[in-house]
Image: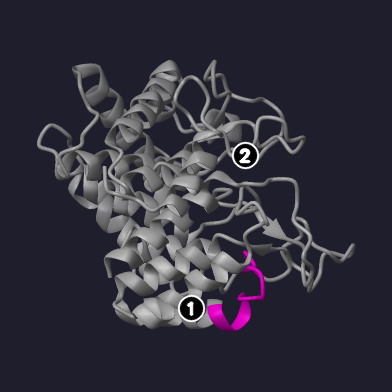
Amino acid sequence: MNNSSPDTEQHLAYIRGLQASSGLFMASAAEVATGYNKAWLRDNFYTAMAFEAVEDWETVRRVWRTLLAVLAKHEDKITWAAANKPHASWQYIHARYHPETFEEFWEEWGNKQNDAVGAILFKLGELEMGGHGVIESEADKRLIQKLIDYVQNIEYWHDPDAGMWEENEEVHASSIGAVVAGLKQIAQLDYIQVPNDLIAKGENALQSLLPRESHGKFSDLAQLSLIWPYQVANEEQIIEILKNLEYHLEKERGIVRYKTDKYYNYNKDGWSEEAEWTFGFPWLAIICAERGDLDKAREYLAKAEAVLTPERKMPELYYSNTDKTNENVPLAWSQSLLVVAKIKLSQG
């Protein structure tokens, strides 16, 4: 493990405090009333990155072996959806589970999230190619192949989904990009078969959407994933995405997810007072560091540090133009992205 600072260790301790005995991370504290004591596929993808950054491969391995166990529990459902076109959102691979029993939650929710499946494929491939793989058995390989059959069968390149924000089913660039990146990574494994045109269909759809996130959203915080970690946007698109986001969505205490976002909107009418999401700042710090703009990366890291609570926890969000957070403190993947940003800049 890298020698991390006492400050980084404090952030990691907060994240470890959100880990269930199964190995999965809850989105936030077990006692919150918001429903964030559940385990999301995507949240675990991003939360485990903090432990990758400090080379705690034992924790990383535990998370990903458990995520494979979650999918294995629901393999019959994946098998069905890979062969039969799902027509209702509950027939798609769910995005969140009970952190101990791995059961799906059945209340009405935007569970149709293709980007979460792309994230799984991406990281499994990346870990394998990086020498930290978790794919152990023929059963694991069979399950991964079924995930590829699944994204092919749902025709991910033009399939409307609820996306990263679990709402407003549209064709989302961030969801298509996640699957494209996932397929590219996993295709490097010689025992996995990815049809020749499956990636190209996604790339073509992505090019037709960008720099927009969707028909309804011209700029969206979720698009940062196309730059990092997925690296599926070209330089011209990156510049446009960042310009739009910084001009339209950046606020004092975070990044608005998209214009007129009604989730925790401070205005009862749901307009112009969108919540400010803290993880936008470390995410931008990571991207700027990756692009070699270390001065700007440090600026964004300083902004991230400024929105920590007095206990140095990263909340999910602040209400617009206030110093009031919602209840989700800390948010696991916010705290994780802060660790990744700090490690990247310490190495820069």
Give the vertical position of 105 relative to 325 (above or below). above
Q: Which quadrant of the rendered structure holds the C terminus?
A: bottom left
Q: Give me the residue at 49% from left, 32% from top.
A: 93
Q: Nearer the viewer, mark 2 or mark 1?
A: 1
Residue tagged by mark 1?
299
342 vs 80, nearest the viewer? 342
Image side of residue 267 versus residue 230, left or right: right
Mark 2 near mark 1, Cβ–Cβ under 8 Å?
no
Q: In the picture provided, is 135 more to the left or to the right than 263? A: left
Q: Which residues are magenta?
A: 246-258
The residue wearing badge 2 is 28
Residue sitting at x 46%, y 59%: 174
**In the picture shown, does residue 164 fall above or below 210?**
above
Main SS, magenta residues? loop
Which residue is situated farthest in the front direction here? 6
The picture places residue 163, in percent across and down from the top left corner, at: 54, 51
